[in-house]
Amino acid sequence: MLPILIGFAFGGLGDKISSTDLRPVVGVAMSPADTAALERAHDRLAERMGDQTLPRLRPVRASPSPRVQLVRPDSEVVAILSGSLLHPVLTGKVEDLDKLQGDISLLSTAALAERTLRFVTVERQEVTTSLGAQAQARLLIGRAAQVVMFFLTILLAGMILSNLVEEKTNKIIEILAAAVPIDAIFLGKLMAMLAMSFVGIAFWGGTAFAIFLALHGGGGALPAPAVGWPMFLLLAVLYFAMAYTLLGSLFLGIGAQAATVREVQTLNMPVTMGQMLIFFFASYAVDHMGSPAEVAACIFPFSSPFAMIARAAQDGAIWPHLVALVWQGAFVALIIRVGVLLFRRHVMQSGGRWWKRLFRPATG
């Protein structure tokens, strides 16, 4: 429950930050008539464009020297607007004037045309399908799937780092190695942790989905990914399993070399940073379908599951996913094999040169 509570806390903090009005304040030192016309124009434009697109206006007392008002300790304004609507004068720092000059010109023009300014009525012609909107929706589905897979993987696969430390400390690993091949020990631990992860995801995912349906009453239909929802969900499960086993087999091999829990904790930081870099690489490739970066993300084994699930949302072809799953499975086998050989050589103190034993069947 702790990650959920932290998520709610950061969500509330984010809402508070986003609701804070950070727009610059412009002090209006004009005649009462011009100030009122400017405020009415501001309200009309903000109604259509949004409040955040225009600076805030605040009437201030006219002064022969607007510069004096800008240096007052209690002043919140970043610029002073004086003169008239026909000839507005904006006083402030150079960088503030560059940002505000266009907005003040728009407001003054709208204030002068207050009586003749009318919004044109736009005729609506509705369609049932828009390829641009569909592509944008599929891009969002691919990004959402990437984020969910990444957070599930980073939360669950990291536990494998310390999986063999206790067995090594209690000398249980020697008993296991005498009974079954070490390859089977590594693969069994990996599959057991993956199965436990699926059980947890099924429970918490089902609970979250039920709460979502209860709160939203079903809501509107989500746009379908390019391969369709049934195939997309199946691919999401398979790619999560491959991402978990790819990182898990690597973590299992790294953690098997650690002698204490302290060493495992030391490894957590570089491992987490490596996961973040892989995710950023795959996330960048989503917006560049067919580019060399996207192809490289699909080929590189550790980013391949994240890049391919995004491709499934945007491209309806199935055969690339079959190739990718076989490619990722081959790397899982290779990583487990290398991890077993290193474990036998450095921990079990057995085995010859690793390149002679790489493709030789291991025995207990």
Image (spheres, rainbow, N blue to C red):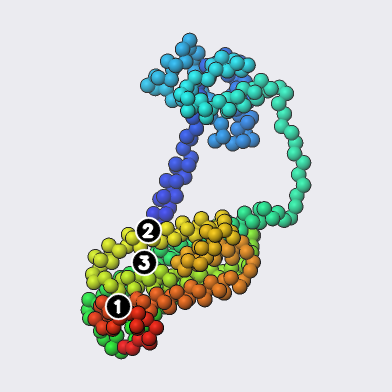
Please state if 201 lies on the left or on the right of 309 as rendered: left
In whole angstroms, how far apart are the C-alphas of marks 3 and 1?
19 Å
Q: Position of residue 268 (x, y in %)?
A: 32, 62
Q: Are marks 1 and 2 in contact (CB under 8 Å)?
A: no
Q: Residue at x 41, y 69 (%)?
A: 247
> Residue 245 at what x, y percent from top left?
43, 73
In which quadrant is the C terminus drawn? bottom left
Q: Residue furthest top?
A: 64
- Looking at the rendering, which quadrant does residue 171 occupy? bottom left
**Residue 226 horizontal side relative to residue 333, left or right:** right
The residue indicated by pointer 2 is 273
At label 3, which amino acid type do we have? Gly
Name the element at disc 3: helix
State the separation of the CA atoms marked 1 and 2.
24 Å
Q: Which residue is mark 3?
A: 158
Q: Residue at x 63, y 69 (%)?
A: 317
Foreground disc of the pair 3, 1: 1
Name which residue lies at 47% across and 45% down. 15
Residue 259 at x, y = what percent?
A: 23, 72
For disc 3, the neighbor class at 10 Å (few under 14, some 14 to 19, many from 20) is some
Does residue 59 appear in the picture of this structure? no
Residue 227 numbered tag: none
Q: Which residue is mark 1?
A: 343
Q: Nearer the viewer, residue 125 or 347?
A: 347
Which amino acid type corresponds to the residue marked 1 in the rendered image? Phe
Disc 2 marks which amino acid? Answer: Met
| Relative vertical location of residue 111 with respect to residue 50 in this rendering, above or below | above
Q: Nearer the viewer, mark 3 or mark 2?
A: 2
